[in-house]
Image: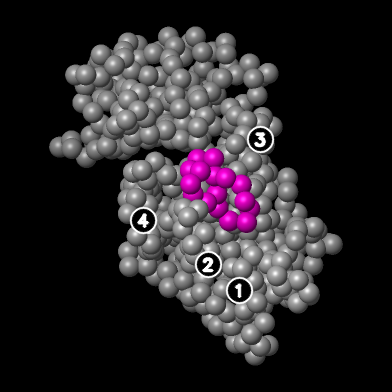
Amino acid sequence: MPRNPIAPDRVPGGSSAGSAVSLSEGLVSFSLGTDTAGSGRVPAMFNKLWGVKPSKGRLSTRGVVPACRTLDCVSIFALNGLDCQTVLKVAEGFDAKDAYSQSTIDRPLPASKKIGVPKPEQLMFFGDTGYEGAWNKALENLQSKGWEVVTVDFEPFLKATRLLYEGPWVSERTAVLKDFLESNPDDFFPATKTIIGGGLNHTACDAFSAAYKLAGLKRESEAVWAGLAAIVTPTAGGFPTLEEMEADPIGPNSQLGYYTNFMNLLDLCAVATPAGESESGLPFGITWIAPRDTDKALIEIAAGGRLSSDAVSVLPATGDSRPPAEDGSISILLFGAHMSGLPLNGQVQALGGKLIGEVQTARKYRMFYLPEPAPHRPGIVRVCETGVSIAAEEWIFSKRSIGGLLATIHQPLGLGQLELSDGRKVHGFLCEAAEAKTAKDISEYGGWRSFSKSLKEKLP
C-alpha cells in the first residue's frame, strides 16, 4: 500500500489508492482506478483529488481483475472537473468484448437548484468532529453558490449499502477467488480471507432473496430524486490512521463505505470533489450523486457549471496542474471582484483570461476587508500558524496580457505566489501586511462571495 503524501500517518484510501497517490504526487496528469464499493472516490478525498465513478458499463472493464463483475466500474482520478470530463469522453464507449459494457447515453439533470442531503440523524462521522465541522462548512459554501439544500430520507441508500457486504454479493467476490482460496488459504491477508471466506456461506436462495430486496430498494429510492439536481454527501465520514486500520482492518473499512457502497448496487453515477479541510488540516471532500447516464451533467454541476469550451484543461502536463508552459500562459488566482460574475470580471474577459476552476488555498492565509479604493475587495495575507483556507478562482492568462492585468491592481495588493490546498504554488494577489493591521479580518467567511452575500443581507 502506498503512503498518503498529505497525511503519512493515515490511510491513502481504498484499493485504487496507488492510482490516486501517483496523481497526488504529480507523477501523472490523471489516473484510472476501479470502483466497486468506493475505491474511486475515497482515495480522491484523502488525496485532494477529483474522482469520477461512472455509470456501470460506461467504461469497459475488459482486462480489469474483477472484484464483483456485475458491479465493477473503471474510475477516473483528475485534478479538476474539466480533466474529469476530458478523460471520460476519451475512455467511454461500448466494448463488444466486455459482456457488461453498455451503450453510452448522455441524459440531462433536472433544471433545479435543489440538492438533497441526508437527514442529520442519518449522517455518520464516527466520532470525527473535525469532519462534521468540514461538512457543515461545505454546505454553507454550496448555499453561497446558489444551491438550495434540502434534507432527504437516505434510508433506501443505507439499506442497499448494508446489502453489499452483509448479503450474498460477497459470494461474487468469492467466486473469483474460490480456487485460489482452496489451494492457497495461507496466502491471504487475514482480513481479506475472513471477508472472502464468508461468501461460501450464502446459498442461491439467499442470492435471489437479496436481488428481490435490492429491486425493492431501487424502486423506493427513485422517489427521493424528485425535484433534485443531485444528492450530495460526505465522501467519507472519517479518515482512519494506519494504526487504527492495523488494529481493526474490517471496522474502519466498513465505515469508509457508509456513503459509497450503495452506488453500484443502485446503478448511480458519482463525482467526488475536494471540499476544504478539517480544523486540523486534513483533506475533506463531498460526493455528488445522480441517476445513471447523467455522468457528464453531474461533472458539470460539481464544477460549478463552468466547463465551457473556453475552459482550460491541465492535460497533458504532469507534476503541476497549470497549463503547459510552452503555450506562453500563466495561472493567476483571483479572490475578489475580478472573479466570474462579479463587477470587474469584464476586465479579466477583455484580457483573454480563461477560467480553470474553483480552488482553495492552503490553511496559511487570512482575508481582510479593503473598502478603499472602490470597488471594495479582499486582501489576502500569509500568516501560517493562524491561517485558514480561502476560496479563489484559478484563471489562465497569456504572458503578454499579465501587464494589462497588473495595471488594474492597486496598492496595497501586489502579485506574489500562494500555496493551494493541493500543494501547488500559483501566482496571485497578496496584501501588504501593514495594511492588514487596520483592516477588518473576514477570514471566517472563507471567501469573498460569502462575505459579499453577508453585506447584501445587512442592507435595508
Whether 13 is among the magenta residues is yes
Q: Distance between the residues labelled 3 and 2?
A: 31 Å
List the residue tagged with mark 3. 27
Q: What stretch is highlighted in magenta?
A: 1-16
Q: Where is residue 323 in the image (x, y as percent from the top left)?
A: 62, 26
Q: Which of marks 4 and 1 is nearer the N terminus?
A: 4
Q: How far apart are marks 2 and 1 (CA)?
A: 9 Å
Is 283 displayed left or right of 52 in the figure?
left
Would you say the residues marked 1 and 3 are in contact, meaning their CB atoms lie under 8 Å apart? no
Q: How far apart are marks 4 and 1 (CA)?
A: 27 Å
Q: Which of marks 1 and 3 is nearer the N terminus?
A: 3
Q: Distance between the residues labelled 1 and 3?
A: 35 Å
Count of marks, rendered view: 4
List the residue tagged with mark 1. 194
List the residue tagged with mark 4. 128
Task: Tell me the SS state at disc 2.
Answer: helix
Neighbourhood count class around disc 2 (C-alpha, 10 Å): few under 14, some 14–19, many 20 upward: some
